[in-house]
Image (tube, rainbow, N blue to C red):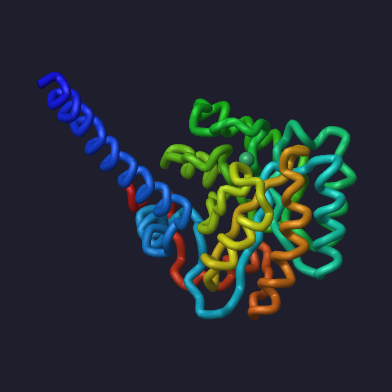
Amino acid sequence: MKELLGKITQRRIIIPLGLFLVVIILLGSIVSCQPKFLMHQMALHNPEVLFYVETDEKVLALTIDDSPNSHLTPAILDLLDKYGIPVTFFIIGQQVPGNEHLLQRMKKSGHELGNHMVTDEPSIMLSHEEFAANLLAVEKLIGPLGEKKWCRPGSGWFNHDMVNNAHELGYRFCLGSLYPFDNKVRNPDLIHLAVMEQMYPGAILILHEGGPQRDYIIPLLDELIPDLISVGYKFMTVSELQELETVKPAEPGKTHP
Ligand SMILES: [Zn+2]
């Protein structure tokens, strides 16, 4: 009897645990693949935010977050020179002091600089005033960027107050559509595989630098860039890619009262 009860309790635990694992794996694969229909829904509900661009042309924007870094950024810039492609760097304000020359080099080489706030913390935790102060502080450091000003909030979470706040200061949010969790995976071969599998025309790819634990980005870029070029992809800055956007974004706040 005791044995039978034991078996039943065991079953009671094993079945829900199995279901739980299946759900976790399913959710995990949806999140890690970010299928295009999901990104399409996100873009539809947030037209004022740029996730990707609808196009048949084989183009993409490579965006690199958490720049600059005295050790990694020069090596990344060397690689981008080697392949002759432009990217968009999202700059963290507190990492700029001492690395100003790297920002100059980015601009000289034709790369674009985006605003990634002062610290690499979830920007959604900032008050309305703090958020604006963060944007303006980094804007001072990255200097005049031309007509387009891109903001990517720390950790990617956002709400409509943030979008409107940024819009009032002349910024548009650029979130991206293809994030291979490079800063979690940290294995250049696995990240390369995921990106090659999931790439599509008009995608905005998100990769990370900013610290020695992200040195995987060097071998990764050295394989990924020529491989994407060899299957016909052309690299653009976010602003160049956005020129291909056919549907004009809605005024922030207008579509989502
Ligand atoms: Zn970041």
Seen at 64% across and 37% down, the residue is 117
Asked if one can make out residue 114 in the rendered structure from this viewpoint, the answer is no
97 vs 201, nearest the viewer: 201
Above or below, 94 against 232 in this view is above
Looking at the image, which residue is at 71% across and 60% down? Answer: 87
Residue 14, position as x, y percentages in the image? 26, 35
Picture residue at 47% right of the left edge, 71% below the top? 54
Along the viewing direction, whichever of 171 and 68 lies nearer the viewer: 68
Q: Quadrant of the image for the N terminus?
A: top left
Q: Quadrant of residue 155?
A: top right
- The residue at the far top in this view is 2
Ligand 1 sits in quadrant: top right
Q: Position of residue 192 (x, y in %)?
A: 64, 61
- Image location of residue 173, percent across then percent down: 54, 49
Is residue 18 among the parts visible in the rendering? yes
In depth, the one of 169 and 181 nearer the eye is 181
Is residue 212 shown above or below 1?
Answer: below
> Which of the image's four quarters has the C terminus?
top left
Residue 5: quadrant of the picture: top left
Residue sitting at x 77%, y 62%: 222
- For the residue pair 59 and 117, the one nearer the viewer reads as 59
